[in-house]
Image: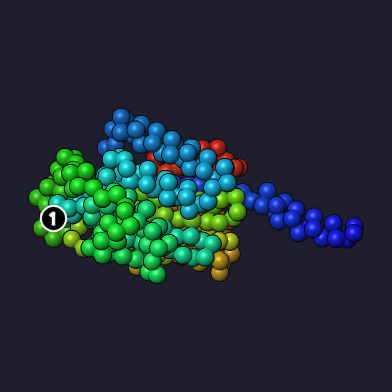
Amino acid sequence: MQIKCLIIATYFLIPQLIMADQNFGIAVHGGAGVMKNLSEERRTKIEEKVNETLTKAYKILNDGGTSMDAVEFVVSEFEDSPLFNAGKGSVYNSNEVQEMDASIMNGKDRSAGAVASVRNVKNPIKLARKVSELTEHIMLVGDGAYEFAKNIGETIVDSDYFYSEKNLKRLRKAKDKLVSSNIIHDKIGTVGAVAIDKNGNIAAATSTGGMTNKMPGRVGDSPIIGSGTWAQNGVCGVSTTGHGEFFIKYQVAREVCARMEYMNKSISDSSEEILMELKDINAYGGLIAIDSEANISMPFNTHGMIRGSVSNKTNINVAIY
Ligand code: GLY
């Protein structure tokens, strides 16, 4: 009888004790770039939005919610804000249209969903998650992604929803300025989040409007699993921001985790080294990364990166420079 009780106690209690030790936390970004002209007013608004969103996301994790729910929440909040280049605040392509990219990955089983060049969908990140959970595919693009969104009842909005005088001015400036390379790498860029929950599950999510004056149909790194987004339980979760073409060529998100996995590097060494290497080839941007102990790294090789983090072992921290 005593032995039986001991076996039952061991079976039920030990996993709970292990779980009690699991660190959890979240990091977010709102783009990297040259932020010298950021007005005091805009800076304050951005910092407040990041702070408020992080606080709510931490509550999701602290209440026992999943890392997938936390990262989706953050990214959809940023998509609903005109302050960031994603969702509502997305920049215009050369046809004066917003084409958006997003992806999400669950480190528990490497399931992932992505949408690219999608129009009129209010929250591309929610659609990306639905691609992962409701289809046998990982990425849907353009009209197919739009049809899927309509069929499953995702919120579709009119083009007016994305209208921005400021973004239109930037497009016209870009068009007037140069003949060949006239794409603007927007200073307020892509948004993303990485998190680990109380069960040790890691998730990552990224969303963007891309670059001002990009060619119609251009897809950046944000919806590419391994480039803009990566999540792998036991190793790390990464979301990137920056010049997408380089982040695709160097598979940056996966590379951070690969160096940790195969070279035993810490999350900060791995992330910082890669950003330095990218700078050497004039590839600019940044990333946020979280490991299985909720250690967080947020390096960038640009003038600034909108970022924030909080975990059960560290206080909330929001910064731009
Ligand atoms: N990193 C976002 C993009 O290049 O589209």
Query: Is residue 320 shown to the viewer in this render?
Result: yes
Find residue 222 and report its image quarter: bottom left
Whether residue 55 is situated above or below residue 9 in the rendered picture: above
**Image check: 4 left or right of 233?**
right
* Residue farthest along the right direction in this orientation: 2
**Image check: 274 left or right of 33?**
right
Q: Position of residue 63 (x, y in %)?
A: 57, 42
Q: Position of residue 144 (x, y in %)?
A: 26, 65
Residue type at mark 1: give it: Asn
Q: Position of residue 180 (x, y in %)?
A: 13, 60
For mark 1, does the 10 Å Cα neighbourhood hold few (<14), some (14 to 19), or many (20 or more) residues? few
Q: Residue at x 47, y 48 (%)?
A: 70
Q: Residue at x 31, y 65 (%)?
A: 140
**Image check: 186 left or right of 47?**
left
Colour convention of the picture: rainbow
Placement of the C terminus among the 4 image quadrants: top left
Query: Is residue 276 shown to the viewer in this render?
Result: no
**Image check: 61 left or right of 78?**
right
Q: Residue at x 39, y 48 (%)?
A: 75
Q: Position of residue 242 (x, y in %)?
A: 33, 54
Placement of the N terminus among the 4 image quadrants: bottom right
Instruction: Give the mark count.
Output: 1
Dot 1 falls on a residue whose secondary structure is loop
Q: Quick one: 166 or 173, which is closer to the camera?
A: 166
Q: Quick one: 8 or 94, which is closer to the camera?
A: 8
Q: According to the image, label 1 marks what residue?
A: 95
Q: Residue at x 14, y 43 (%)?
A: 169
